Amino acid sequence: MNVIEFKATLKAKRPPLNIHPLLTALWYDAKGDWNKAHLITQEILTPEASRVHAYLHRKEGDMLNAEYWHRHAGTNLPEVTIEEEWELLVEKMLSVQTANDL
């Protein structure tokens, strides 16, 4: 799956089956369910989850929390729009999923 195909799944009522949980979180975020995305993300203790967690708090407008999660992820606040950040994260999580499938 690529970003375009992932975006196409947003027309459905439920996220695709058998995708990485962080992709599920990003799916819910794109559908307007920030709380569901946040619940999924905060249960995963990986740098990738911290990165998505940082994005969610940036989107929420809680920059202190976003910076906190970026430190956990070992990343910095991006200098892109929130929409571009979402796409970059989807792309990253799709690559993580593909790597885990090998």
Image (cartoon, grey):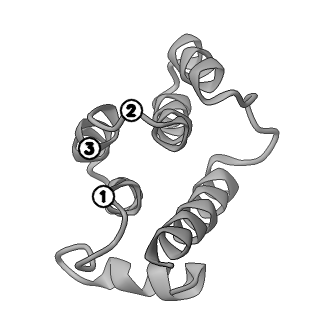
Q: Disc number at residue 10?
A: none
Q: Amino acid at mark 2?
A: Leu
User: How far is mark 2 from mark 1, CA to CA?
Assistant: 19 Å
Q: Amino acid at mark 1?
A: Tyr
Q: Residue at x 71, y 48 (%)?
A: 81
Choose between 59 and 68: the one closer to the eye.
Answer: 68
Q: Depth-wise, is mark 2 or mark 1 nearer the camera?
A: 2
Question: Does residue 101 appear left or right of residue 80 in this picture?
Answer: left
Residue position marked by numbered label 1 in the rendering:
28
Residue position marked by numbered label 2 in the rendering:
45
Choose between 33 and 75: the one closer to the eye.
Answer: 75
Reading the chain from its start, which is encountered first: label 2 or label 1? 1
Q: Residues within 10 Å of mark 2 (few under 14, many from 20)?
A: few
User: How far is mark 3 from mark 1, CA to CA?
Assistant: 10 Å
Q: Disc number at residue 40?
A: 3
Q: Please report contact status of discs 3 and 1: CB closer than 8 Å, yes or no.
A: yes
Reading the chain from its start, which is encountered first: label 3 or label 1? 1
Q: Residues within 10 Å of mark 3 (few under 14, many from 20)?
A: some
- Position in image of residue 64 (x %, y %): 57, 11
Choose between 29 and 73: the one closer to the eye.
Answer: 73
Classify 41 as above or below 20.
Answer: above
Classify 17 as above or below 35.
Answer: below
- Position in image of residue 55 (x %, y %): 54, 38
User: How far is mark 2 from mark 3, CA to CA?
Assistant: 11 Å
- Position in image of residue 10 (x %, y %): 35, 77
Classify 81 as above or below 87.
Answer: above
